[in-house]
Image (cartoon, rainbow, N blue to C red):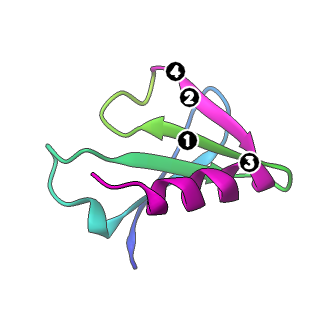
Amino acid sequence: MTGYTRTDEKTGLIYRKSSYSGGEQGQCVEVAETPSTIHVRDSKDPDGPSLTLTRAGFSAFLWLASESEV
């Protein structure tokens, strides 16, 4: 998996987006990691709200998302 990264000028966090996200109109999120938290935001609205989770919380989120049927 490759993608791109960009640094948030306000927070200094380095967000990355997966190449699996598709084109510019895709439904995508960007993720930034710190030693204790994971930050998630909408790639189409980088100045909008973000979600901050503990690493354990993010793991649970991913597990639940992978178990859900769309």
Residue neighbourhood size for the residue with mark 3, other residues' Cα within 10 Å, grouped as few (<14), some (14–19), many (≥20): few
Residue neighbourhood size for the residue with mark 1, other residues' Cα within 10 Å, grouped as few (<14), some (14–19), many (≥20): many
Q: Name the residue: 16% across, 47% down.
A: 24
Percent across and percent down for residue 23 are: 14, 55
Percent across and percent down for residue 58 are: 67, 51
Q: Mark 1 or mark 4: name the one nearer the start of the chain.
A: 1
CA distance separating discs 2 and 4: 4 Å
CA distance separating discs 1 and 2: 6 Å
**Which residue is tagged 4?**
49
Identify which amino acid the numbered label 2 is placed on.
Ser
**Which residue is tagged 1?**
40
Q: Residue furthest bottom?
A: 1
**Which residue is tagged 2?**
50
**Which residue is tagged 3?**
57
Identify which amino acid the numbered label 1 is placed on.
Val
Q: Are marks 1 and 2 in contact (CB under 8 Å)?
A: yes
10 on left or right of 37: left
Percent across and percent down for residue 13 are: 65, 43
Q: Mark 3 or mark 1: name the one nearer the start of the chain.
A: 1
Q: Name the residue: 25% across, 44% down.
A: 27
Identify which amino acid the numbered label 4 is placed on.
Pro
CA distance separating discs 3 and 1: 12 Å
